[in-house]
Image: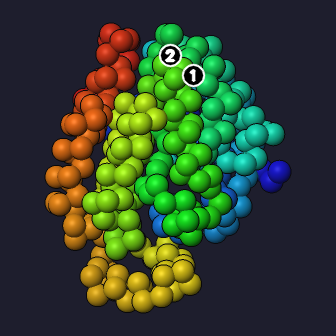
Amino acid sequence: METVPAKHILIRNRSTEWFGTDHTVNLYRGCCHGCIYCDSRSECYGDDSFDTVKKKDNALELLRNELRRKVRPAFIGMGSMSDPYNPFEEEEKLTQKALMLIHAYECGVAVCTKSDLILRDGDIYSEIAKRAPVVCKLTVTTTDDALAAKIEPGAPSPTRRLQAVKGLSEKGIFTGVVLMPVLPFLEDSVENVLSVVDTAADAGARFVYPAFGMTLRDRQRAFYYEKLDRYFPGMKERYIRQYGERYQCVSPRAKLLWKAFAARCGERGLLYEMKHIVSAAQRPYGDRQLTFFDM
């Protein structure tokens, strides 16, 4: 497998707003899920071969050394720029070994993935959760496997991801669904959003966290529009009329979706606001971790 150099693996976050995490770890660079909307293709990230997954040189050694120097346990986010459970992880086991280090140094972890391979490490998450917060997040933006095969062609189906939510939840792991991005005119129907909420609740999820829209810029926009022309003829023109060159592309149905979404989450007992999700994840561990509001 191709490698890329790395000076650091454990990166301190500017804030703890994203699921309460204070550090980020990316063991791989690039992603082969092929999601047509992915912002990581943007020019600002400088990855001209984003669809090729590469592992970072000496990632585990760097992580071990950086964890050893921590004064207090970190709450580590994984899955921001590259899915930690890409297909190569099954053999490479970088994520699995990193989780063992995270456990050894009594840190917490919040992982985001589109892969049911996360189930392989369920026992490790359970062990980490005995001493530190664990949040497992599966991205699901539609329950329509056929639609997902067009917009996320290299990722496991939503059906498989929801089965992973069920498997992790049955182990007592704090698990939920990230409902983002909700693609305008493709996924932003009340029926689709409520279907995700209901199937997540049926799978035992504790939360669903949404964003009703997407972002578009430079070469990411060009890639997305190319795929719209291929799979959804006429849709690109609709985006151009609605959004022009805007970066934030909020669904025109956002208010309607939010109202229906919040009501259904309330009915199903699901958390959906970040502060409540973070509080529920960290509450059993007292003040050992940074709070949602700490910097």
Is there any visible trace of residue 280 in the rendered image?
Answer: yes
Q: Residues within 10 Å of mark 2 (few under 14, many from 20)?
A: many
Relative to 191, is 9 above or below?
above
- SS of the residue under disc 1: helix
Left or right: 34, with 14 as reference point: right
Say which quarter of the image contains residue 253.
Answer: bottom left
Q: Which residue is at 62% across, 52% downward?
A: 156
Relative to 122, is 113 above or below?
below
Q: Which residue is at 37% across, 89% downward?
A: 237
- SS of the residue under disc 2: loop
Depth check: give the residue in front, 246 or 189: 189
Query: What amino acid is labelled 1 in the image?
Result: Tyr
Depth check: give the residue in front, 31 or 172: 172
Say which quarter of the image contains residue 60.
Answer: top right
Relative to 10, is 99 above or below?
above
Residues under numbered marks 2 and 1 in contact, where contact means CB atoms less than 8 Å apart: yes
- The residue under label 2 is 129
- The residue under label 1 is 125
Q: Which residue is at 35% across, 81% downward?
A: 239
Depth check: give the residue in front, 197 or 226: 197
Question: In whole angstroms, how far apart are the C-alphas of marks 2 and 1?
Answer: 6 Å
Is there any visible trace of residue 67 in the rendered image?
Answer: no
Depth check: give the residue in front, 200 or 7: 200
Q: Which residue is at 67% across, 34% downward?
A: 95
Q: Position of residue 141 (x, y in %)?
A: 43, 55
Left or right: 10, with 181 as reference point: right
Query: What amino acid is labelled 2 in the image?
Result: Ala
Say which quarter of the image contains residue 47.
Answer: bottom right
Q: Residues within 10 Å of mark 1 (few under 14, many from 20)?
A: many
Quarter containing the C terminus: top left
